[in-house]
């Protein structure tokens, strides 16, 4: 049986519709597959990387950050001479010595690497304006003063924090534990004192921790997911606890005032005891004499009052 031309056209039309449907179906499947893959990748990145708010990109604040940093530090060898802020084109600061940007054409600082430049001064507080900073390396300089107590407000997203080989003093701030993205902390070879905050042991991402060659004391923190070697605590004679020798139980020190007060009280009680003892003893002796001489020594008085008799 021969099909008419009209039947053939209808069959061809149906075939085209079928092919179009299959093509659309395949495209939809591929689209769903791509969305699933994208979602998985985003989930992995979210667990491993820092998600910086989009509003923090491309702001004047990063330029102000670097201006403040340069202005707060002495630069005897002019290593920061390339930091020319007259150039206002986008991405100009990304060409500065020691500066990495998120994108070479965008004024958004990713890392600051200024090690071994003989820079002098305190910790640069202007870093708080580098709102997307993830790496800070100011090691092997001549920084002095203390690490700010509100450090997490200044280096919120930092993953690497290296201030080793400087002249920093004071304690390690507890607030450093609020920099929750930290992977690396290097504070060795300074003049830091006091105890290492136990809160640092709560940093879940930490991979490197070093405070060797300081003046620290007390128990070391316990990191839940990291084994710290004894070398990381070396040359801090007052530190103790695993992996160092165990901490010894120490008795509470008595203040000098308490010691002096106790001594005075002891002397007072002793003096009163001696006085009361002497009184009781004298009364006992007097009583005994009365018992031995009930007349009250009248015989002595009679002799004293008697007249002498002249012998012939």
Image: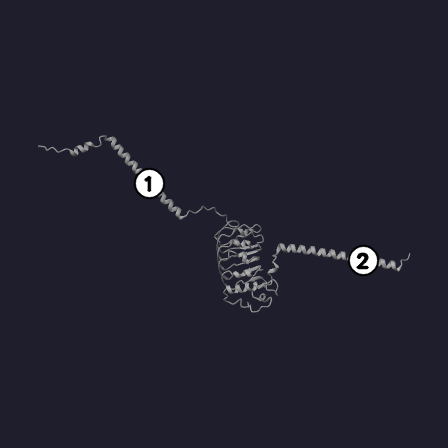
Please state the horizontal and vertical placement of residue 9, each as a whole percent of the image: 86, 59
Please state the horizontal and vertical placement of residue 87, each as a whole percent of the image: 57, 69
Q: Which part of the image, by quadrant, shows the N terminus?
A: bottom right
Q: Mark 1 vs mark 2: which is more N-terminal?
A: 2
- Name the colour scheme: one colour
User: For mark 2, does the 10 Å Cα neighbourhood hold few (<14), some (14 to 19), or many (20 or more) residues?
Assistant: few
The residue drawn where x is 63% and y is 55% is: 46
In this picture, residue 296 sits left or right of residue 71: left
Q: Nearer the viewer, residue 118 or 212?
A: 118
Residue tagged 2: 17
Q: Nearer the viewer, residue 164 or 271?
A: 271
Report, in whole angstroms, how far the alpha carbon at label 1 lies from the one at label 2.
Answer: 119 Å
In this picture, residue 150 sits left or right of residue 26: left
Local SS, label 2: helix
Local SS, label 1: helix
**Which residue is the extreme one toward the left?**
312
Give the number of the mark in front: 1 or 2: 2
The residue drawn where x is 60% and y is 60% is: 55
Residue 31 visible here:
yes
The residue drawn where x is 28% and y is 35% is: 283
Residue tagged 1: 272
Q: Is disc 1 in contact with disc 2, using a CB cutoff of under 8 Å?
A: no
The residue drawn where x is 18% and y is 33% is: 301
Please state the horizontal and vertical placement of residue 65, each as a whole percent of the image: 55, 63
Residue 118 visible here:
no
Relative vertical location of residue 83 with respect to residue 206 in this rendering, above or below: below
User: For mark 1, does the 10 Å Cα neighbourhood hold few (<14), some (14 to 19), or many (20 or more) residues?
Assistant: few
- Kindly indicate the quadrant of the structure image that contains residue 93: bottom right
Q: Nearer the viewer, residue 49 or 214?
A: 49
Q: Which part of the image, by quadrant, shows the C terminus?
A: top left
């Amino acid at each position: 049986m021969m099909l008419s031309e009209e039947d053939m056209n209808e069959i061809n039309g149906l075939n085209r519709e079928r092919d179009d449907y299959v093509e659309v179906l395949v495209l939809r499947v591929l689209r769903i597959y791509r969305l699933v893959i994208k979602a998985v990748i985003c989930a992995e990145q979210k667990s491993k990387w820092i998600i910086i708010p989009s509003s923090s990109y491309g702001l004047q604040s990063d330029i102000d950050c670097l201006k403040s940093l340069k202005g707060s530090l002495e630069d005897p060898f002019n290593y920061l001479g390339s930091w020319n802020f007259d150039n206002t084109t986008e991405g100009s600061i990304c060409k500065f010595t020691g500066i990495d940007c998120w994108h070479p054409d965008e004024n958004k600082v990713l890392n600051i690497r200024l090690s071994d430049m003989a820079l002098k001064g305190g910790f640069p507080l202007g870093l708080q304006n580098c709102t997307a900073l993830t790496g800070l390396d100011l090691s092997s300089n001549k920084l002095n003063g203390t690490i700010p107590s509100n450090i997490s407000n200044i280096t919120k997203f930092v993953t690497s924090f290296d201030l080793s080989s400087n002249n920093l003093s004071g304690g390690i701030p507890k607030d450093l534990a609020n920099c929750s993205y930290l992977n690396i902390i290097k504070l060795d070879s300074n003049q830091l004192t006091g105890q290492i905050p136990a809160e640092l042991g709560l940093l879940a991402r930490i991979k490197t921790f070093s405070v060797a060659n300081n003046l620290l004391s007390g128990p070391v923190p316990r990191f839940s997911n990291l084994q710290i070697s004894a070398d990381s605590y070396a040359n801090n004679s007052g530190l103790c606890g695993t992996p160092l020798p165990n901490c010894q139980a120490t008795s509470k020190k008595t203040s000098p005032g308490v010691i002096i007060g106790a001594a005075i009280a002891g002397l007072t009680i002793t003096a009163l005891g001696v006085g009361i003892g002497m009184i009781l003893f004298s009364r006992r002796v007097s009583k005994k004499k009365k018992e031995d001489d009930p007349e009250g020594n009248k015989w002595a008085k009679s002799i004293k009052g008697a007249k002498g008799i002249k012998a012939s």
